[in-house]
Image (cartoon, grey):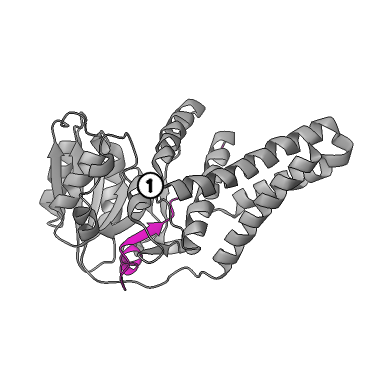
Amino acid sequence: MLILFFVLVGILFCFLLALTVAFSRSRPSTAVADEPVSLVVCAHDEEQNLRALIPLLRQQRHPEFELIIVNDRSNDNTFDLLREAAAEDARIKVVTIDRIPDHLDPKKYAVTLGIRTARYERIVLTDADCRPASTQWLQHMTAGLHDGKQIVLGYSPYIKEEGLLNGFIRFETLFSALQYIGFAIMGMPYMGVGRNLAYTKPLFMDNKGFNSFRKITGGDDDLFVNRHATSKNVSLCIGKEALVYSFPKKSWRAFFRQKKRHLSVGRYYKTRDKLVLGLFMFSYIGTLYLGIGLVIANPHAYAVWACLAARVILLVLSLQHP
């Protein structure tokens, strides 16, 4: 077991070394752009979140943008709220969905209608339960769509709260981000998160949107990126002012249900991505479980290493933004 442990540690070390080198060669972009952009938000029964989000989006320091909010079959007072908001601000456009066509995923259908309504070629996506970190978020995300770049991958951490679940969710989210951002830096982009994502309308329309995986539940963000991202057409926007914070799940059951849905989409990734990610996760999980086994079998010999690993995890969590 000890030999297997060190083999897995070696594989994991190679992955982490490659990611570290990639990050060291990358610098967060501080560029901003003034080109017109369409900001798309889909909402289902999100009245309270929209009351907080809409003012933050209206405050974005971008000279020309429209805010398209897709009201997806809401049963609360979302309709009245959006009608009032649109009357106050001509930049706000409302798309209302009363029913979803058979055999179509609701989120993909809502995003598709939002993008089709968009006036501008640059599209930025976020969710109703998100909060941009600054008033320049939109400019930073738009700046990435230059020089042949068609997709911008952003980062969306979760808001820090009390409790073990919150700490676990934030660590898991950071770990996932290190993977997709790190591999993108290395020229192997494989996913993005819809809470903070941008791409061009021509890329979406020319590839018929989500048509190739329209019947799959989920994947409106990561599967779209996986199908159309290349080493040449992707840029990153991960600076402090370009972050978008989101509210985490409040129960383990809700978190695992969300995670199960996300992981179920992974089997539709490109074969290369599945192989690389599979090897990475196998080495990570194998190292974790074998390490725990070694500590249990011989606590006197390995307890120090376990304490150091726990300390590293706590340090990573403490370095995240609140």
The N terminus sits in image quarter? top right
Indicate the secondary structure of the residue bearing disc 1.
helix
Q: Position of residue 186 (x, y in %)?
A: 50, 63
Query: Which residue is at 45% across, 36% downward?
Result: 263
Q: Is residue 295 left or right of residue 205?
A: right
Taking depth in this image into account, of 203 and 307 the one nearest to the observer is 203
Side of 318 relative to 299 (left or right): left
What residue do we see at 43% from left, 57% from top?
189
Residue 258, quarter of picture: top left
**Mark 1 packing: few (<14 Cα in 10 Å), some, or many (20+)?**
many
Residue type at mark 1 is Asp
Q: Position of residue 302 (x, y in %)?
A: 83, 41
Q: Which residue is most to the front?
A: 271
Magenta region: which residues?
Answer: 139-162
Residue 238 horizontal side relative to residue 145, left or right: right
Give the dominant element type of the magenta stretch: helix, strand or loop: loop
Q: Is residue 109 in view from this perspective?
A: yes
Where is mark 1, residue-wise?
222
Location of residue 48 in the rendering, given as x and y in whole percent from the top left corner: 29, 38
Does 150 appear in magenta?
A: yes
Left or right placement of residue 16 versus residue 141 in this view: right
Q: Is residue 201 magenta?
A: no
Q: Quadrant of residue 229?
A: bottom left
| Residue 311 seen in the current view | no
Residue 134 in the image: state x and y as whole percent: 38, 60
Instruction: Count numbered badges in the picture.
Output: 1
Task: Find the residue positioned furthest to the right.
Answer: 300
Name the residue at 57% across, 39% down: 168
